[in-house]
């Protein structure tokens, strides 16, 4: 323990050098901006900056790229709260309550709590990374395909709580999401599904385009139909959260940190999945679940904490085993490889100064982000005062750029527009959108894991029950589903109006 | 005041239009003896940034810069196991300004599939830059220590040993099938989306053996025991 502290201290002395500080700042700043813009995510951001690795020494370059990754988790919530357009998939649950808070004039506290939750969760996650990395890395290996199936089923059970008034409509929305996810090449056999001989569809429908369409474009269409008013034109009362807010959020932040960090250790578990699970967990544990979806501050703190803890957790398998947990980290791994640095136990032995400087700079980066984001709350909040007819076209421009940037393909922009229209129709017909988004995110991993599991067991589903961890997760999913259903339909619930608690802002 | 402002804006607008028109006029000089390449060359990369293809491309870029002076412009066209990028490359104008990294045997196998969008004759190979043999590997703690034991174990558990591959109709898949043919043994093939997932599954004990590329395995070479070197058409035995 003490020698770890010693290394960390050395790491800080390197990380606090001016060059490294500057690059850390540049990375987190860029990350925040990238998080704010819908469509352009940390994956594309890191990919765009990778060429800089040819001219920079390794430490500042990787510090910058890592800063970009966790910075994006801070930025995604900004537009989610202000204009109901999540900048990242991991900010989708944030928009559920955050936007409602903005409409009640509480955008300032929402943004501030999101920054605070992100900071606390990110830092605590880093502490876990610092002290427990090698042991935790072994934990990551335990997760095989059957366990992923259990995890995905658990995540799907969240659909029930996202369904709002009509469970049937929620299911339809979720199934629609699954159907959309099947378009493209079958991940296992390579058979083209629903591609209509179109090369663009061969690569499938990217969920970023779906999110941009369903949230950004549909929101603009719906707003313009009504009165095109700014989100909250009156004078805002408080920009900072009240003591009560902090008290309410505290539990949420702690729990979501735990959920986010441990799930972030699992390769393949993206911050998006984790933020949904944390939101749902918070809702279940709350004494007043009907407040969720109507502006509960825990509903902002939980997903934001979870996605930052997950990003810290994601560094554990990356640095200890060289295994990236997601596409953005894979690109970062590529950055390591450019320098001939092999992440893994060897890295701790051969280049300890580099590793500890990186870890130390992540602590510094989180502090920088907190300092960056809190004062900016006042600035962002002014966005709400812009007349909507001027804000909406700007949002559209950024949305189109974002949709295009995913794969450098104009086709994705058309997909986003198409989903915008679909989202508009869904809002009119009162179908919840969030289950669709959740299914699209989860579908591929569920399908791949299920098929791998069946290959492993030569076609027998029993393997899901014979593996203890998988059995545990599936049982947990079944129990949670049963509890959610009970909560919806019991007489008590109807009396308390839980059933009518919509989670979709209309 | 207002009228003057209007006129000012109008003049600026006119100026901008004129400038746009002038710059739009392409210079139609015949390609006077221009040294190739006289502008940056596009390089299509069919896989995600940060992956092996990307790393290799950047190494190529380093030498390209030394040789030709200007850089390669990377374009990532990701999807369908490389098919999206390969298709783009096949359809690009043949003016020498679009090159791409293609992988064997993907480029041949994908061209043969029912949803092929290109044929292997759409490409001309310029240089082989990477030679990455496939290997069969088990994790270090595995009870299987050499090829003979692997074959014995496979025969004893008819078809139950799980073997990991990356992608269907990929080099791994073909190699695994050929291995099964040549040795007369059967395995359950478990397909993974990428080498990273495959490595984790092997190290975690979820699959028994895997067909991998040397490039992906060598990172943690002490965790694996690699046994056989399967080259694309040859088959060596290394114990």
Image: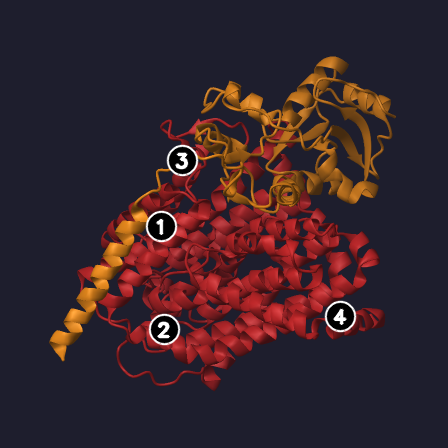
What residue is shown with label 2?
A101
Other-residue count near label 2 (Cα within 10 Å), few / some / many at <14 / 14–19 / ≥20:
many
Q: Closer to us: mark 3 or mark 1?
A: 3
The first of marks 3 and 2 along the sequence is 2
Verify CB contact (< 8 Å) between mark 3 and mark 2: no
The first of marks 1 and 4 along the sequence is 4
What residue is shown with label 4?
A11
Question: What's the mark number on residue A170?
Answer: 1
The first of marks 2 and 1 along the sequence is 2
Secondary structure beneath label 1? helix
Pick whichever, A243 or B168, lies toward us.
Answer: B168
Q: Are discs 1 and 4 both within one chain?
A: yes
Number of numbered markers: 4
What residue is shown with label 3?
A200
CA distance separating discs 2 and 1: 23 Å
Q: Residue at x 24, y 55 (%)?
A: B18
Tell me the colour chain B is drawn in. orange
Quadrant location of residue B177?
top right
Rendered position, A33 above or below B107? below
């Amino acid at each position: 323990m003490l020698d770890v502290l010693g290394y960390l201290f050395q790491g800080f002395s390197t990380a606090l050098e001016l060059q490294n500080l500057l690059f850390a700042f540049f990375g987190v700043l860029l990350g925040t901006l990238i998080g704010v813009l819908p469509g352009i995510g940390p994956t594309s951001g890191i990919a765009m900056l990778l060429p800089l690795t040819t001219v920079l020494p390794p430490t500042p370059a990787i510090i910058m790229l890592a800063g970009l990754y966790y910075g994006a988790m801070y930025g995604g919530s900004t537009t989610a709260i202000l204009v109901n357009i999540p900048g990242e998939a991991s900010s989708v649950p944030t928009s559920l309550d955050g936007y409602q808070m903005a409409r009640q004039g509480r955008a300032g506290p929402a943004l501030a709590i999101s920054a605070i939750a992100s900071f606390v969760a990110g830092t605590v996650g880093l502490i876990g990374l610092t002290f427990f990395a090698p042991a935790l890395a072994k934990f990551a290996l335990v997760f095989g395909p059957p366990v992923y199936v259990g995890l995905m089923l658990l995540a799907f059970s969240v659909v029930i709580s996202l369904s709002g008034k009509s469970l049937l409509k929620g299911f339809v929305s979720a199934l629609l999401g699954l159907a959309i996810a099947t378009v493209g090449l079958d991940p296992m056999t390579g058979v083209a599904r629903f591609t209509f001989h179109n090369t663009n569809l061969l690569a499938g429908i990217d969920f970023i385009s779906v999110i941009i369409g369903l949230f950004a474009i549909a929101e603009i269409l719906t707003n313009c139909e009504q009165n095109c008013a700014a989100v909250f034109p009156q004078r805002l009362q408080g920009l900072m959260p009240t003591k009560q807010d902090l008290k309410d959020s505290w539990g949420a932040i702690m729990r979501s940190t735990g959920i986010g960090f441990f799930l972030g250790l699992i390769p393949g578990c993206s911050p998006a999945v984790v933020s949904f699970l944390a939101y749902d967990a918070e809702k279940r544990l709350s004494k007043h679940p009907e407040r969720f979806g109507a502006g509960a501050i825990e509903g902002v703190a939980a997903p934001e904490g979870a996605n930052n803890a997950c990003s810290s957790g994601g560094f554990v398998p990356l640095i200890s085993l060289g295994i990236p947990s997601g596409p953005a980290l894979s690109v970062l791994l590529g950055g390591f490889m450019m320098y001939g640095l092999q992440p893994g136990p060897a890295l701790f032995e051969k280049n300890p100064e580099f590793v500890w400087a990186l870890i130390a700079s992540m602590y510094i980066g989180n502090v920088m982000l907190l300092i960056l984001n809190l004062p900016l709350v006042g600035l962002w909040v002014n966005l709400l005062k812009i007349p909507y007819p001027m804000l909406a076209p700007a949002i559209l421009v950024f949305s189109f750029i974002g949709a295009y940037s995913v794969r450098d393909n104009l086709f994705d922009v058309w997909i986003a527009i198409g989903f915008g229209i679909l989202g508009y129709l869904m809002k009119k017909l009162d179908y919840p959108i969030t289950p669709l988004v959740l299914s699209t995110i989860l579908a591929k991993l569920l399908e791949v894991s299920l098929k791998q599991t069946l290959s492993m067991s030569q076609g027998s589903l029993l393997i899901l029950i014979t593996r203890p961890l998988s059995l545990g997760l599936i049982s947990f999913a079944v129990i949670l589903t049963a509890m959610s259903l009970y909560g919806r339909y019991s007489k008590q619930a109807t009396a308390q109006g839980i059933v009518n608690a919509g989670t979709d802002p209309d | 005041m207002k009228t003057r402002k209007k006129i000012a804006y109008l003049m600026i607008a006119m100026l901008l239009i004129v400038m746009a028109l002038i710059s739009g006029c392409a210079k139609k000089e015949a390609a006077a003896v221009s040294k190739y390449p006289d502008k940056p060359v596009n390089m299509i990369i069919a896989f995600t940034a940060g992956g092996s293809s990307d790393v290799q491309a950047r190494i190529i870029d380093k030498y390209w810069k030394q040789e030709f002076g200007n850089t390669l412009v990377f374009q990532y066209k990701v999807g369908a196991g490389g098919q999206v990028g390969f298709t783009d490359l096949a359809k690009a104008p043949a003016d020498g300004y679009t090159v791409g990294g293609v992988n064997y045997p993907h480029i041949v196998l994908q061209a043969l599939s029912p949803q092929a969008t290109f044929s292997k004759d759409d490409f001309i190979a310029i240089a082989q830059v990477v030679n990455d043999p496939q290997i069969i590997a088990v994790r270090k703690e595995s009870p299987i220590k050499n090829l003979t034991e692997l074959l014995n174990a496979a025969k004893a558990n008819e078809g139950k040993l799980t073997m990991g591959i990356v992608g269907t109709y990929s080099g791994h898949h073909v190699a695994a099938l050929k291995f099964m043919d040549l040795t007369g043994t059967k395995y359950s093939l478990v397909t993974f989306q990428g080498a990273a997932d495959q490595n984790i599954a092997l190290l975690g004990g979820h699959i028994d053996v895997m067909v991998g590329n040397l490039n992906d395995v060598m990172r943690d070479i002490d965790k694996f025991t690699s046994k056989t070197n399967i080259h694309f058409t040859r088959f060596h035995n290394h114990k």
